[in-house]
Image (cartoon, helix red, strand yellow):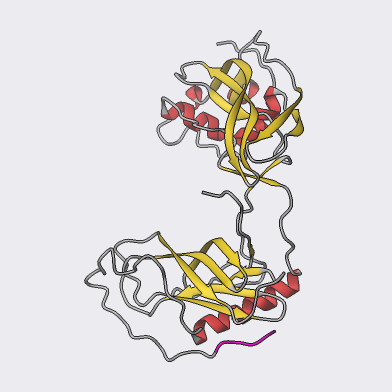
Amino acid sequence: MRHSYLVPAVVLAALTLSACGDEVAPTSSPSSATPITPRPSDAVGTQIPQGPATPLFLDRARAVAQAVRTAGLPKPPEGIFLYGTRTPDLAFDTTEQKVAWIAGYVAIAPGVQLGSGGTTRIDFTDGPSVSVDVLAPRPALTAAIGATHDNCGHMAVPAAKCILVITGGSLKTVEVDTSAGRATVPAWSFTAKGLSRPIVALAVSPAVLKPLPQPTTLPGLADPDRDLLSVGSLTRADGNTLTVNLHHGKCDPDLRAHVLELDDMVIIGGSHAPFDGACVDVGLSTPATVTLTASLGDKPVISAETGTRLDVYPHLR
């Protein structure tokens, strides 16, 4: 059986192989637009303008505020955050190799000695060095693979070929971008059977270089209305000025950014005018700058889409 000699990354081992504040008053409903002819690509412009909060946005913002207070006001994130993955420049030569990696079916060839951990440091271009423990090769692989998804036997990948065999490894350093600036970080460089380039996996714990928080909708919060815009990253928070990326379709009409200022939080989002039909081009992202009536201070900025906290991460490109 395959599982007698292949193991998911989480148990990777050497193997023997036999082979409430002031609210903005709503405006009147915006005009609709026809979906038949998509808007030209330059119709959005370089910024989505701020507009008075619509009743639809205000209803959503109030629901979000209630969900945030129920869950507890979120605190600012702490630590150093990694911008990017734990496997810089990861690439595969075949579908079989990629599917095996994603499934966590990674084996160490018999007799291969990969070395051990130890201590070293992370050097930051714009700051002091930080002493860290070096992850041993197997934990580094486990952290690099992360959550597994088994498609072996599917996607035209025979189960018998769903294996990636590590044939060697050495410790090196790589440069990565973090919230503390550009950093030189220890990493394991693994060779694998049939793979033309090494697999480079960071050799520091995810607790040291944390992954960027991913937004998840707060419990009890319904999906937002289709005429509200998805909220991306907060790129600026300066006094009473906030800049956020809003996601939309190319033919979404009358894009507007909105904000609701409350005593304990600021909720940001956007909307477009309703229209019938499908948008030809979706998945676009455009910045929007909103001006608050007072300085933000220490209030959290909350996404009107998910209810999660938005923070500006330094050095994020």
Q: Is residue 83 left or right of residue 39?
A: right
Between 89 and 3, the one lying in front of the other is: 89
Please indicate, yes or no, whether residue 158 appears anywhere in the rendered image: no
Does 232 sit above or below residue 20? above
The quarter holding residue 300 reads bottom right
Q: Residue 294 at what x, y percent from top left?
A: 64, 80
Residue 232 located left or right of residue 254: right
Residue 75 is situated, as x and y percent measured from the top left of the image, at 74, 62
**Viewer-side residue, 234 vs 98:** 234
Residue that protrudes farthest toward the top in the picture: 111
Q: Nearer the viewer, residue 50 or 12?
A: 50
Whether residue 22 is visible to the viewer of this picture, yes or no, is yes
Figure label count:
0
Range of the magenta residues?
Answer: 20-24
Residue 213 percent across, percent down from the top left? 64, 53
In the picture, the quarter occupied by the N terminus is top right
Q: Is residue 240 magenta?
A: no
Lateral position of residue 265 relative to residue 151, left or right: right
Who's the residue at 49% across and 85% down the image? Answer: 52
Q: Main secondary structure of the magenta part?
A: loop
In the image, what residue occupies the spot 61% across and 16% down? 169
> Residue 284: image x %, image y %?
39, 60
Q: Residue furthest left?
A: 37
